[in-house]
């Protein structure tokens, strides 16, 4: 649902538009509402950060604890994204290409992480992966601390990110013609060769987009992570939690600095995602 | 759109055979039965592990100490206040963002103007913002040390750590949902029908009710359902602005957090089970609407 295709140009342009009413009022409302609710609040962070001294900003953003938080956020989001690329691809493939009992149900449940409040996901995952949990007891037994550790954060982010990959890859697979695969097969290519040389290269843009979406969501995620992470500074403290901590200490300047860095990172990621989607859309329309 | 059609070559011969001269050799574009079963097993196993197990955990934990404890947890005054606040917030947020979504989609899809693509990008912005930062924005504006803080204090208006703050933060995080559902839909429908109505003399509101609304109703409902789910379940953004005052500014997700942090696990999971029910209803409605929409 996050993968909106770039809108096509409307079939009619020019004078015919003027026939329809309501342009000014709807545009005015849209811009007004957008400014009040989104643009002005966002500019507050930028303006607030201008009040900080350059040295103070620098010292906050490159503080060892802050750097550690970025590193943990990035590493766990990366790990979760990679897991989701592999398994999300398999899930999407199975959903599109095969038929089996319970497929509709499986397809419906994929969006659960979109619909389930993150706090609920957080406490449920913690209860499963804690030392006495259903899975935690086995993992702890073989020496993997699956809760209150970086692994726990990655588990939460895997939950959150899964639908992004599946829902990006699935429509692309659905719109595919199998003719290239058939041609390869008639030329004697083994199925594994077809997979490696045809399927993966063609799917790469959408896999990358799905990964980037999951990754972007992962570094900003808060609710599902705070319960399972244990929140130890330098070890399992993620960047959004750091903002929360600074706020609780009334360190508005510090919170602003970290928030600004995160906002810039997310916007850059968003730009990258848009470029990827644009590229993928072009690839699909060109023969 | 998802999963509703099975792929040719797996179970049935392709229905579009007329367009294709050579029917594909059976199985040449699919895997061996063994590989197929293996992949299905992996997919089911992964979904079971990642998605279904947490769902089961919520209900098992909620009923661990019996149905009495479960229902007691849901009927205590703080829980009821949290439920009320969550419903009330959604009741304000969803209609506002729906009106915005319709207005935005109308001007963006029925008219041509410069800067359109920019506007679409700006509408999507809240999706890129971490929920914690979303809440923080409103602290910066309306908090005690914020831009309007002293003015608000002087006029005895409280926004942050009160209902208005919760509503604002929720509005922010659910801002794009209806709009981004409607924009592609109305884009693909074009303007012909509305233009025909206009030439026949229909005025704005009448035209919208009789032409546009019937065309977009399923997509609109879909957007509303998703917007509502997020509005009721938002945690991070609301957590920053709410102040966690029991019985007053605690939404249901925050109530879950407080109980959990106080080691009242059964009660926390009982409250969580309500939110799971909302999520499951949302998914059911979503799938039903997805089929309707096609």
Image (spheres, helix red, strand yellow):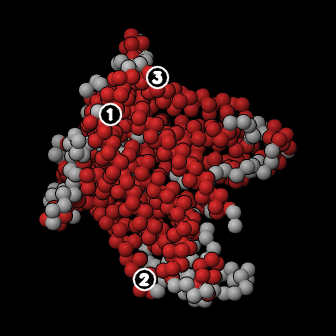
- What residue is disc 1 on? A62
Name the residue located 51 percent from the left edge and 69 percent from the top edge.
Answer: A200
Query: Where residue B140 sits in the image (x, y, percent)?
Result: 40, 24
* C-beta proximity under 8 Å, tags 2 and 3: no
Name the residue located 39 percent from the left edge and 10 percent from the top edge.
Answer: B154
Name the residue located 66 percent from the left edge and 50 percent from the top edge.
Answer: A7
Taking the image as shown, residue A199 lies to the left or right of residue A74, namely right
Q: Report the quarter where the C terminus of chain B lies.
A: bottom right
**Residue situated in front as seen by the camera: A276 or A148:** A276
The local secondary structure at tag 3 comes to helix
Q: Callout 3: 10 Å neighbours few (<14), some, many (20+)?
A: few
Checking the image for residue B35, the label placed there is 2
| Spatial CA span between label 2 and label 1 | 50 Å
* C-beta proximity under 8 Å, tags 1 and 3: no
**Residue situated in front as seen by the camera: A71 or A248:** A71
**Residue situated in front as seen by the camera: A88 or B138:** A88
- Chain letter for mark 2, please: B
Taking the image as shown, residue A66 lies to the left or right of residue A215, namely left
Label 2 in the same subunit as label 3: no
- Chain letter for mark 1, please: A
Label 1 in the same subunit as label 3: yes
Picture quarter containing residue A67?
top left
Checking the image for residue B284, the label placed there is none
Instruction: Give the vertical position of A266 relative to A167 (above or below).
Output: above
Asked if one can make out residue A232 in the rendered structure from this viewpoint, the answer is yes
Mark closer to the chain start, 1 or 3: 3
| Spatial CA span between label 1 and label 3 | 20 Å
- What residue is disc 3 on? A47
């Amino acid at each position: 649902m996050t993968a909106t295709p770039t809108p096509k140009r409307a079939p009619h342009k020019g004078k015919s538009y003027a026939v329809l009413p309501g342009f000014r009022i709807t545009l005015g409302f849209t811009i007004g509402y957008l400014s009040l609710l989104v643009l002005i609040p966002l500019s507050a962070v930028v303006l607030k950060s201008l009040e900080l001294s350059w040295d103070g900003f620098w010292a906050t953003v490159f503080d060892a604890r802050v750097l550690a938080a970025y590193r943990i956020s990035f590493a766990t989001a990366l790990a979760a994204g990679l897991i989701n690329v592999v398994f999300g691809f398999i899930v999407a493939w199975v959903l599109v290409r095969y038929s089996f009992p319970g497929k509709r149900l499986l397809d419906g449940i994929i969006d659960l992480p979109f619909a389930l409040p993150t706090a609920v996901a957080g406490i449920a995952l913690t209860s499963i992966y804690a030392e006495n949990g259903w899975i935690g007891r086995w993992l702890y037994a073989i020496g993997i601390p699956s809760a209150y550790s970086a692994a726990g954060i990655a588990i939460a982010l895997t939950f959150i990110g899964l639908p992004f990959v599946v829902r990006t890859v699935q429509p692309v697979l659905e719109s595919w013609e199998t003719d290239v695969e058939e041609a390869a097969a008639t030329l004697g290519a083994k199925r594994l060769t077809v997979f490696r040389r045809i399927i993966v290269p063609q799917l790469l843009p959408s896999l990358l987009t799905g990964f980037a979406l999951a990754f972007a969501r992962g570094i900003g995620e808060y609710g599902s992570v705070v319960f399972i992470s244990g929140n130890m500074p330098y070890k399992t403290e993620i960047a959004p939690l750091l903002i929360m901590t600074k706020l609780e200490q009334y360190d508005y300047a510090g919170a602003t600095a970290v928030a600004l860095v995160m906002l810039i990172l997310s916007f850059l990621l968003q730009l990258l995602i848009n470029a990827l989607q644009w590229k993928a859309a072009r690839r699909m329309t060109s023969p | 759109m998802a999963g509703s059609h099975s792929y040719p070559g797996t179970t049935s011969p392709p229905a579009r055979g007329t367009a294709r001269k050579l029917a594909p050799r059976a199985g040449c574009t699919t895997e061996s039965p063994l590989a197929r079963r293996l992949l299905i097993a992996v997919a089911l196993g992964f979904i079971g592990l990642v998605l279904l197990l947490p769902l089961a955990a919520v209900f098992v934990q909620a009923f661990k100490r019996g149905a009495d404890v479960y229902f007691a947890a849901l009927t205590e005054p703080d829980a009821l206040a949290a439920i009320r606040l969550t419903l009330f917030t959604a009741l304000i947020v969803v209609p506002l963002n729906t009106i915005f979504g319709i207005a935005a989609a109308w001007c963006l899809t029925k008219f041509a103007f410069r800067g359109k693509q920019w506007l679409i990008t700006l509408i999507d912005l809240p999706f890129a913002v971490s929920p914690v930062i979303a809440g923080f924005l409103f602290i910066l504006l309306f908090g005690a040390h914020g831009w309007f803080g002293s003015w608000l204090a002087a006029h005895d208006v409280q926004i942050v750590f009160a209902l208005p703050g919760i509503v604002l933060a929720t509005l922010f995080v659910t801002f794009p949902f209806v709009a981004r559902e409607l924009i592609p839909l109305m884009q693909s429908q074009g303007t012909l029908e509305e233009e025909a109505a206009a030439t026949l003399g229909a005025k704005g509101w009448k035209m919208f009710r009789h032409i546009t609304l019937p065309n977009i109703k399923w997509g609109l409902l879909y957007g509303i359902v998703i917007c509502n789910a997020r509005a009721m379940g938002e945690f991070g953004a609301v957590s920053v602005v709410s102040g966690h005052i029991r019985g007053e500014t605690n939404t249901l997700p925050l109530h879950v957090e407080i109980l959990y942090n106080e080691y009242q696990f059964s009660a926390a999971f009982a409250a969580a089970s309500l939110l799971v029910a909302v999520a499951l209803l949302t998914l059911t409605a979503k799938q039903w609407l997805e089929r309707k929409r096609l």
